[in-house]
Every structure is written in structure tokens, then in C-alpha cells.
Image (tube, rainbow, N blue to C red):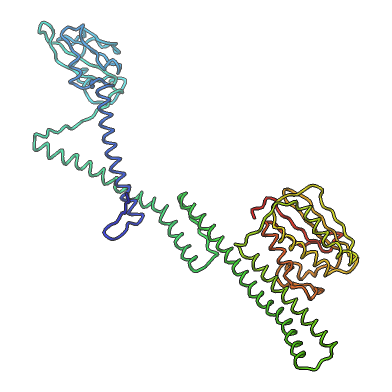
């Protein structure tokens, strides 16, 4: 069942909803209180007090012409007692424990006994006085006495509804009483609804203002709600969402800037070889060139074509790696054994440049899932950079080991260092050192970084006491790739 609270065609706001809710609650509570009062009174009278009440009618019922059969009733629970006086007001019979020493009463004492006065040492007891008859029809006085401190006097109006005057008076008395009670309750509920609504309306207004600011693409928007626990949970979720969207926006801006810079770099890097190819091709077609010049021009055209091909292939590879939907072809392999085979493939090239090669690979197997083809490209890019950018007799150190469930690979050399101006951006596309080989695309390290990150790892460029250039790669062997 779906409830939709409306007044006419207008939906209830929280304040009105709470007011109605409190009114319904009030009615339920009022009925409950009345029922509980009636039921508790019924139980008290019927089962606890056994229908006995300290009243004139109940006290006179304790008397019996046979004095030995006089009852104390509920007076025994209250510490009271009963006395029978003869016509001279002298005590001739006592029922219960008498707590004063009066054995003959005066008119004044009897009057003070039944009078509504406060407790005092001189007037410690209150009671009821009844004129009764004995067995022989002789007149006696029957007294009931109780400690004044145990009795509260009250004047109770009991209207007779068969009388018109009593009916009208009772309506005025009880009607006024209940009307005042209801008005006070309604005023209290209204004030309480205003106070309690502050816990909802004020935080919601703050939240709405934050949403309006956020709609203006103000990603610095944060909401600060002081109120109910649930509203604070909404605040936390909203702030977390804005923070994530802010990061996404910053990342989108970075990607857009990278794309713009990439387009400029691509245009620049492709324009040079294409211009060379176009120029030398024109010379071959239009000019009379010697055989030697012709061979030289063709070599230049071939080199520029190869460079353009490498650049386009690297761009394509980088584009695929930046796609979040690109999946790795994972296979479970021994990384250390795989690395040894890769080093063997490059051994001849290292020998040709007379590199002092130091290999320190852990003897223990490091087995985990990785994309063999992409990983080979990532490490090969670093090896190729070492070969292209260093002089002969350079020392090259390759180290691999397991640390805290991460495979650590270090590749360092003591050759030419990298300029500090580009050390922080070395893994970005088209960043090249001054001594870069013209055949490189400037995308190798950017591709390496993407491949390592696809495996859940990280790569950084640093240096040590012995290595001017040190690449440190860390890959978790249980990465969610």
C-alpha cells in the first residue's frame, strides 16, 4: 500500500507532515493513557484493595452489634483502629491497637477528630464518628481512627446527571478541564514540531544550496549538515561523490590537455619525416641525380618511412593501453626465469657496446600472472634506451627480487644522466633527452609506464650512489589485472 499525503493538490512539507504525525501520536497516546488509567484503577480496586475504600460507607460496614464481630478491614493495613463509646462517650470496646490514651471523649475531641485540619502533636489522628445501636437497641458511638499523615482530604464533586442543573455544571467543569488539557497539549505539540523540524528542514536547505552550487559545476562544493544521523550519512555520501567527480574532472582535463599536446607532437613528429620523404621523392623524379645520390636519397626515404611506421605503431599501442576496456592476455609464468631469457636475447647487443653487465636475479621462483608480450615490450624499451643513450663500456645492473608480495625489478646504469628539467615528465609521451636517437618515437617509456600500471604496478626514475639512472619497477604478484 502506497501512502501519498496531500492537502488538495499540494504535497505536504516536512513541517506539516510532522504536525499531523504528532497529532495522530497524541490521539493514540491520549487514548492509551485513558485506557491504562481506567484499567489500572479497575485492577487496583478489584484485586489489590478487594473493593475496599476508606470512606464513610466502608467504615460503617465494619461495625457489628456483636462487638466481637466488628471488623478492622483495610484500616489494619493503614495502622488504624476502631472504638465503641457508650452514651457518656466512654470507651467500652477497642478493635485493633489503640495508639492514644483517651478513654473518655468530650464533644470538642469528637469534633476535632472529624475536622479537616493539618497534622499536629495535639491533633495526631483523624477519623469518622457514627451513631449506632447495640444488641438491646441501646445507642452507642462507633469511632474509626487513622494517623492524619496517612490521609489526604479532598472534596470530590460527583454530579447527578439526572438533574439538569448538575448536567450543565458538569459539562462546564469537565468540559473546561479537558479543553484546557487539549489546548495545552496542542500548543506543546506545535512548539515541539517547530523545534524538531529544525533537525530536518535546516539541514535540507543547506543540502539543497550545496546541490545548486554543484549544478553550476562548482566541484569545490562541500555540504556541512548538522542534524540527524541519516542526514549526516547523506552528507558524507554527497561529499564523497563530489570529491570523486572532482577527481574525474581533473583527470578529464589532464587527458584533454594530453590529447591536445599529443596531437601537436604527432603533427610535429610526422611532419618532419613526411616532408623529407616528399622532398627527396620529388628530387628523384624531377632532377637528374647520380647513382650515388639516388641511393643516398632512397636510404633517407626508407629511414624516414621506418621512423613514421614506428611512431604510428607506438601511438596505436599507447592508445590501446589507455583504453580502460583493454584486457591483458595473462599467463602464469616464473618471472625470474622469463627475465633471464629476455636478457639472453639482448646479450649480443650489450656485448657489442662492451657493456659491463651485472645481473642479480633471485634464485627463488616468482610465479604470478602477467602478459608476456606486453611485459617484454615494457622491459625492452628500457634496455633499448640504455643501448641508444649510453656510450660504450657503460655499467648496466639488472636486479630482481621479491619484497612484501611485490616483485621488484631494478635497471640502472652509470652512463649519461637525465636532465633534471625532464626527469619529472620522462614517462609522458614525446619527452626526449638531448642525446636521444632520432629513430626513437619518444613514446617508449610512456608505453612502459602504461603496461606496468595495467599490471597494477608502478615505475619510477631515480638514482643511487652507483647508478646515475635507475628505473625501479614494483608489481604486486596478486594484482587484480
- The residue lying at 83 percent from left, 67 percent from top is 387
Q: Is residue 204 above or below residue 269?
A: above
Instruction: Classify residue 179 by image quadrant.
Output: top left
- The residue lying at 64 percent from left, 66 percent from top is 320
- Indicate left or right for 137 with 309 as reference: left
User: In this orientation, which residue lies closer to the viewer: 236 or 2?
Assistant: 2
* Percent coordinates x, y for residue 450 in the rendering: 68, 63
* Percent coordinates x, y for residue 189 in the rendering: 32, 47
Q: Is residue 416 above or below residue 37?
A: below
What is the number of callouts on the image?
A: 0
- Indicate left or right for 123 with 444 as reference: left
* Percent coordinates x, y for residue 400 in the rendering: 79, 53
Instruction: Classify residue 133 by image quadrant.
Output: top left
Instruction: Classify residue 381 by image quadrant.
Output: bottom right
- Indicate left or right for 272 with 37 as reference: right
- Indicate left or right for 465 with 203 as reference: right
Q: Is residue 481 above or below residue 266?
A: above
* Percent coordinates x, y for residue 360 in the rendering: 84, 53
User: In this orientation, which residue lies closer to the viewer: 314 or 22?
Assistant: 314
User: In this orientation, which residue lies closer to the viewer: 427 or 140?
Assistant: 427
| Quadrant for the C terminus in the image | bottom right
Amino acid at each position: 500500500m502506497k501512502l501519498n499525503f496531500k492537502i488538495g493538490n499540494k504535497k505536504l512539507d516536512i513541517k506539516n507532515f510532522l504536525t499531523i504525525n504528532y497529532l495522530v501520536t497524541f490521539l493514540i497516546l491520549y487514548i492509551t493513557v485513558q485506557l491504562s488509567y481506567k484499567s489500572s484503577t479497575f485492577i487496583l480496586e478489584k484485586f489489590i484493595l478487594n473493593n475496599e475504600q476508606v470512606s464513610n460507607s466502608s467504615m460503617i460496614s465494619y461495625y457489628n452489634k456483636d462487638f466481637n464481630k466488628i471488623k478492622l478491614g483495610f484500616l489494619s493495613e493503614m495502622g488504624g483502629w476502631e472504638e465503641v463509646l457508650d452514651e457518656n462517650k466512654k470507651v467500652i470496646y477497642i478493635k485493633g491497637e489503640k495508639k492514644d490514651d483517651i478513654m473518655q471523649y468530650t464533644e470538642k475531641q469528637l469534633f476535632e477528630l472529624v475536622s479537616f485540619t493539618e497534622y499536629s502533636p495535639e491533633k495526631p489522628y483523624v477519623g469518622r464518628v457514627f451513631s449506632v445501636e447495640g444488641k438491646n437497641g441501646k445507642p452507642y458511638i462507633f469511632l474509626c481512627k487513622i494517623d492524619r499523615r496517612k490521609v489526604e482530604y479532598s472534596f470530590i464533586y460527583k454530579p447527578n446527571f439526572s438533574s439538569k442543573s448538575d448536567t450543565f455544571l458538569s459539562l462546564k467543569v469537565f468540559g473546561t478541564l479537558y479543553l484546557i488539557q487539549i489546548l495545552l497539549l496542542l500548543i506543546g505539540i506545535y512548539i515541539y514540531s517547530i523545534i524538531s523540524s529544525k533537525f530536518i528542514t535546516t539541514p535540507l536547505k543547506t543540502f539543497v544550496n550545496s546541490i545548486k552550487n554543484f549544478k553550476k559545476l562548482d566541484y569545490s562544493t562541500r555540504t556541512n549538515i548538522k542534524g540527524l544521523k541519516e542526514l549526516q550519512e547523506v552528507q558524507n555520501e554527497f561529499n564523497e561523490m563530489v570529491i570523486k567527480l572532482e577527481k574525474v574532472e581533473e583527470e578529464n582535463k589532464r587527458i584533454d590537455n594530453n590529447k591536445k599536446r599529443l596531437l601537436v607532437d604527432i603533427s610535429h613528429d610526422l611532419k618532419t619525416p613526411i616532408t623529407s620523404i616528399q622532398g627527396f621523392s620529388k628530387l628523384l623524379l624531377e632532377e637528374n641525380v647520380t647513382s650515388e645520390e639516388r641511393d643516398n636519397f632512397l636510404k633517407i626515404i626508407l629511414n624516414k618511412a621506418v621512423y613514421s611506421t614506428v611512431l604510428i605503431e607506438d601511438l596505436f599501442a599507447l592508445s590501446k593501453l589507455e583504453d580502460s576496456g583493454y584486457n591483458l592476455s595473462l599467463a602464469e609464468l616464473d618471472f625470474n626465469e622469463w627475465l633471464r631469457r629476455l636478457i639472453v636475447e639482448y646479450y649480443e647487443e650489450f656485448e657489442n657496446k662492451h657493456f659491463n653487465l651485472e645481473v642479480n636475479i633471485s634464485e627463488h621462483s616468482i610465479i604470478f600472472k602477467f602478459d608476456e608480450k606486453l611485459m617484454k615490450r615494457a622491459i625492452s624499451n628500457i634496455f633499448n634506451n640504455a643501448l641508444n643513450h649510453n656510450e660504450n663500456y657503460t655499467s648496466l645492473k639488472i636486479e630482481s627480487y621479491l619484497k612484501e608480495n611485490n616483485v621488484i625489478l631494478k635497471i640502472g646504469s652509470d652512463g649519461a644522466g637525465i636532465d633534471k628539467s625532464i626527469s619529472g615528465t620522462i614517462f609522458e609521451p614525446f619527452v626526449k633527452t638531448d642525446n636521444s636517437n632520432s629513430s626513437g618515437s619518444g613514446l617508449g617509456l610512456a608505453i612502459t609506464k602504461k603496461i606496468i600500471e595495467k599490471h597494477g604496478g608502478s615505475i619510477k626514475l631515480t638514482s643511487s650512489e652507483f647508478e646515475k639512472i635507475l628505473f625501479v619497477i614494483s608489481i604486486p604478484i596478486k594484482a587484480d589485472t
